[in-house]
Structures are given as structure tokens and as C-alpha cells.
Amino acid sequence: MEKKTDLLSLSQDTGTMSKKELEASPGYSSKDCLEKGSVVVIECTEEIPCDPCETVCKKGAIVVGDPITNLPRLDPEKCNSCGLCIPICPGLAIFMVDATYSKEEGAVSFPHEYLPLPKEGDDVEAVDRRGKTVCKGKVVKVQSPKGYDHTPVVKVAVPNKYIQEVRGMKRSEKGVE
Amino acid sequence: MAPQNNFRIIEHPILGRMEERKRIAIYVDGKKVFAYEGEPISAALVAAGIKVFRYTSNRDEPRGIFCAIGRCTDCVMTVDGQPNVRTCVTLAEEGMKVETQKGLGKWQKKI
Amino acid sequence: MAKEDLTCELAVVGGGPAGLAAAIEAAKAGVRVSVFDENEKPGGQLFKQIHKFFGSKEHQAGTRGHDIGYYLLDECERVGVDTRLNTVVWGIEEGKIGIIDGKTSKIVDAKRAIIATGASENPLSFPGWTLPGVMGAGACQTMMNAHRVLPGAKVLMVGSGNVGLIVSYQLLLAGAEVVAIVEALPRIGGYVVHAAKLRRAGIPILTSTSILEARGREAVEDATICSLNEDLCPVEGCERILKVDLVCIAVGLSPLAELCWMADCKFKYLSELGGFIPIHDENMRTTLPYLYIAGDVAGVEEASSAIEEGRLAGVAVAEELGYIKEDEAEEEKKNIRNRLSSLRLGPFGDMRARAKLELMRERG
């Protein structure tokens, strides 16, 4: 079993977390959790004093504990997929994945603070952790209530096999006026 | 992706829409430049695409913004006849005359 | 020089997060506080921090920096802090503080002073660094978030510490294109989560790479970057030219401690905290009995630590002046120190915690 610090070194070099590193972190949802439906996936692998994900979770599904540098631990049984943890994370490191969205498709929800915000029904290019397009996706939901404090959450439907790859969408060429 | 000729951020995902502010006119080397009341001179210049604020004494090298908070004096220009005015912390006012400064500038008004 | 005496019990120099927090604690206890700030708006760098803060609930984690700023300003008003804006503090000596208020120079007589003047960005010199279009990352952040103008459309970010990463992200939000982030060391300096969201946006983070030169006739038109070897020297043949019109430098901050030098405080050099730091004790008191410090001037950390250090100094001064009883003050200070400790945990915080301990040990 590789030391945690050795795993982390991969992302410290490039900024993208490797599968190994993610799977070793207590907030990452593994394959079997995904089969049950919508579940939160926390991609937080570095010890930073931070715990708003624990504070916001009404079901106690996310535990950081003491000291607050502990990596957040997810209990998928307790998670009711309310998604409040997604916009609150200062590192924008929390996502939601639904493997059961439809027969062939899964859905991935991610924080997206860019303008212009996509609209439901938009076709977008779904990207992975390196920003590379993996497939086409359809925007099925865009949430930006006041309580999210300017961190909209976008949900895209993608072919099922990509749900653990897709973590965002290509930003629009239009940018800001 | 980037805004083309307009360097003002009208709509921002976190800051929201730019608030209504009074438009004023300042004159940079004689040319009319629009500014917003209450913003520093440097902001109006950046918005107008002006990058060079002065030239150095000895080697005539162009200089512009560096720290933007009034500590480095790289952004100084001659304003209403007074040289060495830090444009990043001095607010634009209606009718202000801003000039690209050469070296240490020259006093053009009585103090 | 016009000499007009202004008196207050506590003079706070600098109206950023540390200064405001200090003034609030002191004013709450009843101390007559005046905050002096050279800017026309208080808040220091806080209003440019439009991202959500880390930490925990007591540090207002999940809240955007600028909202924390508004909260501090409201508190100041509520407890009656006297704020003197557009006021430059030019000197300090034996409890007397020289200020320029408009066009007049005045002397302020204060029983105690807290210097919370923050830190300034470090420059990085390379051929072409003086060209318009080369500026500090913080400078770019000021133009974007405080003044709502974009100083460039295609950007090269030099430095991958948290400032470099956060400002790069904010450049994307403002509509600019970040062509690359270069980092001289082989590791990304800031939080991996900050780097991750930039990578998701397709921004390359090139480690073991630095800028060699910026070129342009009147302003930046392109920049040359190059891979570095283990000795941080450029590797021949690995140069690349990037078409950019803005080069942001994010290579660290250094405390703005001129007033402390002037007052004759003792300093200690600690690179982990940004350079020469005025020595202070666990109450934020310097080697001069009337002078306290708080925030980045006492060691470059974060806004959350600045706020807590400000609170600590404010309570310590209020106690000294007899406005808070000893046991009440000790309780409050203990809570603040606990909150500070929790911010200085983990691989990033550990280093700063140790440096702070070293600093305080010198004070004795």
C-alpha cells in the first residue's frame, strides 16, 4: 500500500489527482456505492484545515472530525444526495454522480462558476480532470439558488462509462462581455 | 474567450453586474477618455486599452501598472499639471488632464 | 508642519482584516480606538478575495472574503470605531504617530499602537520585467475585482502558490485566457484543489519551468518560458514563446514593516513567514512595550489568521489598558489562540506554526 504522501505527489506535480490517489481517499465513492443511485464524490486528498462540508451536511454523511485537517470521510448510506456540499466546498472539490440516471447514461453534477452559465437542454463537451473532452453531454439541470452563493451546480448526462471521468464541461467561447 | 476591445468587466459570475456609476470624461494627452466617477485613473486607462503611463528619464523605457496599490510608484503620471501622481490610488475627476510623463516630469502649476 | 494633537488610547495603523478585527475587539471593550488607513476604502486586500475561505465555521469557512469584509465593516460601525481614511501614517516614535490627513501633517498621541500594515508582493526581475503588462498577481486581482477592469486578455502566471492559482482562476472568471502557469520548483506550491479546478478548465500548470524574458515594443507582446533542471537553471533548447499581453508575478509576499523598523523593533529573519518579521510575543506585542502587530506584517499567512491575530492584539491592548479583567481576557485569548492553531495545521500550516513559535521564543 503506497504511502499517502507518495500518492499525493502525483497531483502536486500536475494538479490532477490520479485514480489511485482518489480511491485511497475516504471521501471518494467507489464502484459499489455508485450502483445504488445518486451519491456524492469528494475529491479532497490534501490535509488543509477545512470542514464546511461536514458542517453543511444535515445527514452527518460527511465527517471531518478533529483535527480539521482530516480528509473528509463519506458514508454513502447516510447521503441523501441533497447536494448542498457541492457549492459550499471552497476547493470546488465535491461532485455528485448518478449511475442509475438512465439505462445507458449516468449523470454528473459539478460546480461551475463561469459565465455564461449553460441552460437545461444545452449540448456541451464534457471534460475530465485534465480539461480534455471525453464525450458529449447534455445539460439536464442547472441550479443556482441564493444559498449557493454564486456557485452554480450543473448536471450533465453522459454515457455511463464516463461518470468517473467527467468532472466539468468546456467553458463557452463567448466568455464575458 | 477574452473580451475583444472592451476591458471593462460588465458581468462577473461572483461580483454580479457592474453597478450604475456616473460617467465622466478625462483627457489623456489631449484625447477624451471615459471614466467612471470614483474609480482610480489607472482603471480608466486600462479600460481604454492604454498601457504606457510614462517613460523613464535616462533610457526612455515605457512603464505602467505594477503593484496597483500605491506602493511602487511605477504608474505615476502628470495629473492637472502635477507630476508623479500615483494613478492607481488617485481617483479620476471630471475634466482631469492626464499626461504621459517623461522622467520626473515638470511642475506646470503653482502649488 | 502643522502640529495638531490628536489623542486616542489605541492607534491602529492599517484598516485591513487584522486592523479592523483589532479595533473591533478593543472598541467593544470600551477602548477609544482610531484606525488609520491610506486608502479611501478600508478592508485592505480582503475585498479582492472573492473566493470562499477554508477553515471551519468559526473562521467563516465557505464564506467569500469580500463578504467577511462587509461583516467586519458593519461590526466597526456598530461598536463605534473611529476610522480615518485617506490618511498616511508616515512615522512612529515612542507612542507618537505622525499622520498626513489630507494635506496637513499631524501628530497623534496614543497610549498603545497596533501596526497591521500587511505585506507587499515580491518582484521578480527578468529581461523585460519593467514592460507595461508585467505586474504583480495581486495587482491584477485589484484591477479585476476592485476596479472591474481586465489588464490583459492572454495571461502567463508566474508562480503556483495559492496566490498564483487563485488569481489564475479569477482571471478565468473575469473572461481572460490563462495560457499557462509556470512554477520553477518541481511541485505545485499551493493547494492541490486550487490546481485541480484550473486543470479541469484546461489550464496547463508547468512545473520546473520559469519565465526567461518578456518582450514587446511598448508593452508585453510575448514571453519566453523554459524548463529548468534540478539546479533551477534553464535547460538549453527547452524554450517556448507564448503570445501573451499580461505576465502576472506571484512569487510571494513580504511584510510591510517599515514603521516597525522606524520604531526600532527587533526583527528575525524567517523565510517561511516572508522575510524579516518583527519579533512578537503570544499577545502580539513587539519588543517595544507600547507596540503590537497583527496580520501579514507579523508573518505572511492568510486573511483568517490575520483576523485572529488582530483580535488577539485588540484584546491584549484592552486588557493592558484596564478595560477587560485578567481572567476574562485570558479566556478570550485562549479561544483565539486555539482558533489560530487550528488554522496552522497540516503540511502547509505546520511550517508556519513552527516559524511563529521560533519568533515568539525570541521575544521571551
Image (cartoon, coloured by chain):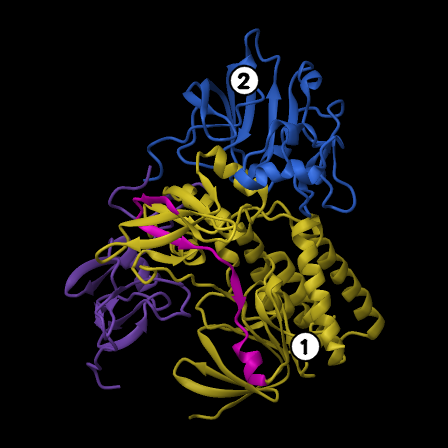
Chain colours: A blue, B purple, C yellow
Q: Amino acid at mark 2?
A: Tyr
Query: In the image shown, does C172 or C349 lie closer to the viewer?
Result: C349
- Left or right of residue A81: residue B17: left
Q: Badge 2: few (under 14), some or many (20 or more) residues near its Cα, within 10 Å?
A: many
Residue at horizontal 49 percent and vertical 36 percent from the top: C199
Q: Nearer the viewer, mark 1 or mark 2?
A: 2
The image quarter containing residue C335 is bottom right
The question of residue B81 being in magenta is answered with: no
Rendered view: C13 above or below C240: below
Q: Which residue is mark 2?
A: A162
Residue C289 on image: x %, y %: 70, 83
The question of residue C257 being in magenta is answered with: yes
Rendered view: C307 above or below A38: below
Residue C259 on image: x %, y %: 54, 79
Q: The C terminus of chain C lies in which quarter of the figure?
A: bottom right
Q: Which residue is mark 1?
A: C31
The image quarter containing residue A53 is top right
Q: Which residues are magenta?
A: C236-263
Co-location on one chain, circles 1 and 2: no
Q: Chain of mark 1?
A: C
Residue at horizontal 77 percent and vertical 74 percent from the top: C324
Secondary structure of residue under mark 1: loop
- Count the marks: 2
Q: Badge 1: few (under 14), some or many (20 or more) residues near its Cα, within 10 Å?
A: many
- Extreme front residue here? C236
Residue B15 visible: no
Q: CA distance from mark 1 to mark 2?
A: 61 Å
Residue C143 visible: yes
Q: Amino acid at mark 1?
A: Val
Q: The N terminus of chain C lies in which quarter of the figure?
A: bottom left
